[in-house]
Amino acid sequence: MIERIFPAPATPGPASDEDLLAWYFQDRVEGTWVSFNFVASVDGAATVAGRSGSLGNAVDQHVFQLLRRHADVILVGAQTIRAEGYGGELLGPEARQWRRDRGLAAHPPLAIVSGSLNLDPGHEVFTRAPVRPLIITTAAAPADRRAALSGVAEVIDAGTDALDVTVLIDELARRGLTRIHSEGGPTLLGTFQAADRVDELCLTVSPLLAGGTAKRIADVLPGARPAGGLAPRPMTLAHILKADSMLFLRYLRAR
Ligand SMILES: NC(=O)c1ccc[n+]([C@@H]2O[C@H](COP(=O)([O-])OP(=O)(O)OC[C@H]3O[C@@H](n4cnc5c(N)ncnc54)[C@H](OP(=O)(O)O)[C@@H]3O)[C@@H](O)[C@H]2O)c1
């Protein structure tokens, strides 16, 4: 059972899926919109034993799925694909029908960000994809890997040597993909933070002390750490939901 605790609802009680969709998708502006969804432990770990799975539970998975509903494209960093898989359909039958009823494509494509193009064309993320994935890279990517992946995905350049987030967003928008929903991972969020292009962050706080040296939810590419660290980006709290001891926070870029 999920309930909203901030803003306090007029009538407290369990939230329906319609409530959740209304709360998560309000306050958006027209044009491009970039949302990120993460789960972290109470002490800020983005992974346990190298993956995010054990931070979540069935309620978190339900919210994770609902957040895909309005997406024109699901954006993910290559290491998340390598760690988590992402093969097959991203949405179940009910969600696909929900999208069709609203004039959206049943399947939002997956867009994978990779500088190295170190991705196997035989990976299930390509072989089981219901729609052709996109791969977003730079002009400096190895030509042989680009050629190999071009058979299974549309390979798009966003930048010459380094990834240019504005070009990435523009390239997606040019294809009609303006509602960009990212599921991470940390390097990708840090890249968007650096470019100040994070409009929304949905964060599940998992009731768990993880400890150790796991990444936080925003990080940078190895060797690309800016002097003084990533520029902090203020955000405004939009809502807090609660399910037992798990919290679901929604933050929007401070205006
Ligand atoms: N807690 C959560 O909600 C959550 C969510 C997602 C993932 N994760 C976890 O996070 C871990 C992966 O972390 P990560 O930070 O390595 O993941 P990531 O951001 O998904 O992937 C990093 C990779 O994406 C590409 N990339 C990202 N930003 C780039 C940039 N600015 N320029 C060029 N390439 C860029 C690079 O791919 P190439 O190496 O191919 O060049 C880079 O190595 C996994 O263990 C995963 O399970 C947790």
Image (cartoon, helix red, strand yellow):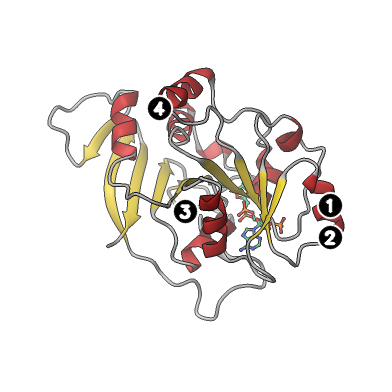
Residue at coordinates 56% horizontally, 63% vertically from top-left? 167
Hey, what amino acid is under mark 2? Ala
Q: Disc number at residue 102?
A: 4
Dot 2 corresponds to which residue?
143
> Given contact means CB atoms under 8 Å apart, are the residues at marks 2 and 1 in contact?
yes
- In terms of depth relative to the viewer, which is nearer, 250 or 27? 27
Q: Which residue is mark 1?
A: 147
Q: Secondary structure at mark 3?
A: loop
Residue 90, x across and y down, in percent: 58, 31
The span from disc 3 to disc 2 (Cα, nearest Å) is 38 Å
Image quarter where ligand 1 lies: bottom right
Q: Position of residue 172 (x, y in %)?
A: 55, 51
Q: What is the distance, in whole Å, between disc 1 and disc 3 at their CAs?
A: 39 Å
Mark pair 1, 4: CA separation: 36 Å
Could you tell me the amino acid type at mark 3? Answer: Gly
For image coordinates 59% across by 47% down, the residue present is 76
* Three-letter code for the amino acid on which mark 4 is drawn: Arg
Question: The residue tagged with tag 1: helix, strand or loop?
Answer: helix
Mark sitting on residue 44: 3
Looking at the image, which residue sits at the far left? Answer: 10
Tell me if the residue at label 3 has its CB under 8 Å from ligand 1: no
Place of residue 107 in the rendered image (x, y in percent of width and height, measured from the top left): 56, 30
Q: Is residue 97 left or right of residue 31?
A: right
Q: Quadrant of residue 14?
A: top left
